[in-house]
Image (tube, rainbow, N blue to C red):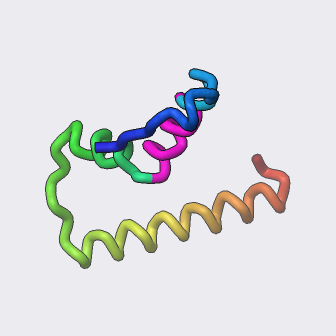
Amino acid sequence: MIEVTRKDGKESAESLIRRFNRRVQQSGLVLTVKQGQYFEKPVSKRERRQKAIVRTQRKAMKLKKIKLGQR
């Protein structure tokens, strides 16, 4: 759990909230909660590699089309 205390009683509410939000973002708590929201079927190492290869090929093809002015 993330806790943020007020500094010397002189800190404004806005800066306190800003510090809290920064700590939440740095902890990665929001990402872990969002990832656990839906079940994802475990993928084998081979499938992950294949998907990565396809992704890089698509990206290369997209960049090539942009350079040729076809997009």
Q: Nearer the viewer, residue 34 or 19?
A: 19
User: Which residue appears at 53% of the width and 28% of the height?
Assistant: 17
Where residue 5 sits: x, y (%)? 45, 37
User: Which residue appears at 83% of the width and 60% of the height?
Assistant: 68
User: Which residue appears at 74% of the width and 58% of the height?
Assistant: 65
Quadrant where the N terminus sits is: top left
Residue 30 lies left or right of residue 67; in this view the side is left
Q: Is residue 22 magenta?
A: yes
Labels in figure, total: 0
User: Which residue appears at 48% of the width and 52% of the height?
Assistant: 26
The residue most toward the top is 13
Where residue 58 sits: x, y (%)? 55, 62
Magenta span: 17-26
Residue 52 lies left or right of residue 1; in this view the side is right
Task: Establish if 40 lies above or below 38.
Answer: below
Task: Establish if 55 lies above or below 39.
Answer: below
Where residue 30 sits: x, y (%)? 37, 41
Task: Establish if 71 lies above or below 44.
Answer: above
Q: Nearer the viewer, residue 3 or 57?
A: 3
Overall secondary structure of the magenta section: helix
Residue 68 lies left or right of residue 14; in this view the side is right
Where residue 71 sits: x, y (%)? 76, 47
- Quadrant of the image occupied by residue 48: bottom left
The residue most toward the front is 8
